[in-house]
Image (cartoon, helix red, strand yellow):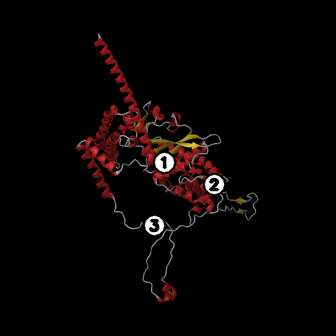
């Protein structure tokens, strides 16, 4: 009987020990998670103060990642990726011209002013004593102050010499201005638009810039000008948006902005919609929710390249919109895990970086060729990556940076794989993030919006200016000419005035004639 009691006591004691061990293990896991969290916070703080802002690995880390890749992929796959990259390098080198050495010549379109420098001896004795046998010419870039002119609109009055009283006094019509009865012509308005929305100058800075040229221009005046111009440009931006929503795929992202009205400060949101090599469109909404997404993407059917935010989820219900996820976004999680779990982070980064290497090598290939090369080279890497994620998942500590990265990849598996089978789709959504940076840079300068209406003004003009930059159109001349053409342009042809179509439109004889007839534009062309 005593033996039974002793065994029972021993069992109870073992159970108590196991409970204590479980509690200690849970406590250890808790403190380890806190340690990893603090380590990540310290890394972020250090990087924010003194570190590089990019996600590029250091030289040593990059070499370690390459070494890790050799253990994750077969020799054959590695050899094929290397050969693909080398073939692309050979192709690029064959088409690249040798870089010119020395100073780059100054642009030919700039006017030249000759400054002739004579030797002192020639100056003393005069030109008659010497024979000129040649010259040495060098060029220096100089700047004249920006010039403004006042256009005096003179309308002579006429009557017929035969004194036909029925005809009365004859007088020309006042040339139409972008803002009726305004004080600024299209060139001046375009200058304020470019400075405000492309160079990100806040209104008080614009006020100082024009004051240096002796122009007293109140910030409230510039603000009113831009608000009054929105109805003129809005039909063009709306047509660009409809055209963008016809594209087979669009890249979308969003960022917040402070809106400071008389009441307390709140948040608004800018969305960017990019169709590569065609349009960049911004839209402002008060909220960041499903209703806002519906307004931005109303009627869209096709591939949607986005991050995995839940606000887009309802779009995928009827399968008219297909989610495509961003490998750069997935990569970011593992880069953040480098400080807390470097070994596993290097393995994930090695595989993702291999995908980007393949993509760089095939970037200029036709769609079908790109699909074939992706299936051959990228698909084995993607399969290996997700096998790695599935294998590591049970080992990971919940809420650690590595756990977050693997969870994201596993949850977005289908969206991350879709690029493999359609050569039009990008590997990442970096293009929309780059365009959205325009708002981030502006936000550092003008700090906040004054109202929701200010958000609409911002979105209208940044859409046009960002599209100009994408397709290589000079923004000031473009906006100036738009203001000359838009008032009388056929509404059903307004898309012809989009930046992507501008080169073809402005080359037309009828358009050249309309521009030449505008007296305000003629003043801005110089001599």
Q: In this view, does 172 lie above or below 103?
A: above
Label 2 and label 3: CA atoms lie apart by 36 Å
Quick one: quadrant of the C terminus?
A: bottom right
- Image position of 490 (left or right of 336): right
Q: Name the residue under label 2.
A: 177
Mark 2 and mark 1: Cα distance apart in space? 33 Å
Position of the N terminus, as image quadrant, is top left
Q: Residues within 10 Å of mark 3 (few under 14, many from 20)?
A: few
**Dot placed on the residue nearer the N-terminal end, 1 or 3:** 3
Which of the 4 quarters of the picture holds residue 522? bottom right
Between circles 2 and 3, the one closer to the viewer is 3
Residue 260 percent across, percent down from the top left: 61, 43
**Which element is circle 3 on?**
loop
Q: What element carries label 1?
A: helix
Q: Residues within 10 Å of mark 2 (few under 14, many from 20)?
A: some
Task: Name the spot of residue 210 as percent of width and height, x first.
Answer: 61, 59
Residue at left 50%, top 71%? Answer: 112
Q: Rate crowding at label 1 as few (under 14), some (14 to 19) or many (20 or more) other CA atoms within 10 Å.
A: few
Name the N-terminal-most of marks 2 and 3: 3
Determine whether, in the image, residue 456 is placed left or right of residue 315.
Answer: right
- Residue 134 sits above or below residue 78 on the image: below
Q: Mark 1 points at which residue?
A: 437
Residue on which the image places disc 3? 106
Q: Is residue 113 left or right of 186 when viewed as pictured?
A: left
Residue in the picture at 38% in, 49% down: 56
């Amino acid at each position: 009987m005593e033996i039974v009691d002793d065994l029972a006591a021993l069992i109870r004691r073992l159970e108590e020990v196991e409970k204590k061990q479980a509690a200690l293990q849970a406590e250890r896991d808790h403190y380890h998670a806190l340690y990893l969290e603090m380590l990540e916070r310290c890394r972020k703080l250090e990087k924010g103060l003194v570190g590089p802002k990019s996600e590029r690995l250091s030289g040593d880390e990059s070499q370690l990642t390459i070494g890790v890749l050799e253990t994750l992929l077969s020799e054959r796959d590695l050899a094929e990726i290397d050969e693909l990259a080398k073939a692309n390098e050979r192709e690029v080198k064959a088409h690249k011209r040798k870089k010119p050495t020395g100073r780059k010549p100054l642009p030919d379109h700039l006017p030249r002013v000759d400054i002739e420098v004579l030797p002192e001896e020639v100056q003393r004795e005069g030109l008659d004593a010497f024979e000129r046998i040649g010259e040495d010419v060098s060029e220096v870039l100089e700047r004249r102050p920006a010039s403004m002119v006042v256009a005096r609109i003179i309308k002579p009055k006429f009557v017929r010499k035969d004194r036909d009283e029925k005809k009365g006094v004859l007088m020309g019509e006042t040339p139409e201005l972008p803002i009726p009865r305004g004080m600024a012509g299209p060139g001046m308005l375009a200058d304020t638009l470019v400075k405000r929305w492309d160079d990100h100058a806040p209104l008080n800075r614009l006020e100082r810039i024009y004051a240096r040229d002796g122009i007293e221009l109140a910030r409230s005046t510039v603000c009113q000008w831009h608000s009054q111009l929105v109805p003129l440009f809005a039909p063009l931006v709306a047509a660009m948006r409809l055209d963008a929503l016809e594209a087979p795929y669009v890249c979308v992202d969003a960022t917040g902005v402070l809106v400071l009205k008389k009441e307390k400060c709140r948040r608004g949101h800018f969305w960017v919609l990019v169709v590569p090599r065609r349009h960049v469109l911004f839209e402002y909404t008060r909220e960041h929710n499903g209703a806002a997404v519906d307004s931005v993407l109303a009627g869209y059917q096709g591939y949607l390249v986005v991050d995995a935010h839940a606000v887009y989820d309802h779009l995928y219900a009827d399968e008219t919109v297909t989610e495509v996820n961003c490998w750069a976004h997935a990569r970011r999680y593992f880069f953040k895990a480098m400080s807390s779990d470097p070994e596993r982070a290097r393995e994930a980064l090695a595989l993702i970086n291999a995908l980007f290497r393949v993509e760089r090598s095939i970037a200029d290939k036709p769609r079908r060729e790109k699909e074939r090369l992706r299936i051959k080279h990228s698909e084995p890497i993607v399969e290996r990556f997700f096998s790695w994620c599935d294998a590591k998942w049970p080992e990971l500590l919940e809420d650690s940076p590595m756990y977050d990265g693997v969870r994201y990849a596993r949850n977005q598996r289908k969206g991350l794989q879709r690029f493999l089978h359609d050569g039009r789709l990008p590997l990442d959504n970096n293009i929309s993030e780059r365009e959205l940076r325009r708002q981030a840079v502006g936000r550092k300068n003008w700090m906040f919006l004054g109202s929701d209406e200010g958000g609409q003004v911002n979105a209208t003009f940044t859409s046009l200016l960002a599209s100009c930059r994408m397709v290589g159109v000079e923004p000031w001349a473009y906006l100036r000419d738009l203001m000359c053409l838009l008032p009388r342009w056929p509404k059903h042809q307004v898309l012809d005035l989009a930046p992507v179509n501008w080169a073809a439109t402005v080359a037309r004889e009828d358009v050249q004639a309309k521009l030449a007839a505008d007296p305000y534009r003629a003043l801005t062309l110089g001599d």
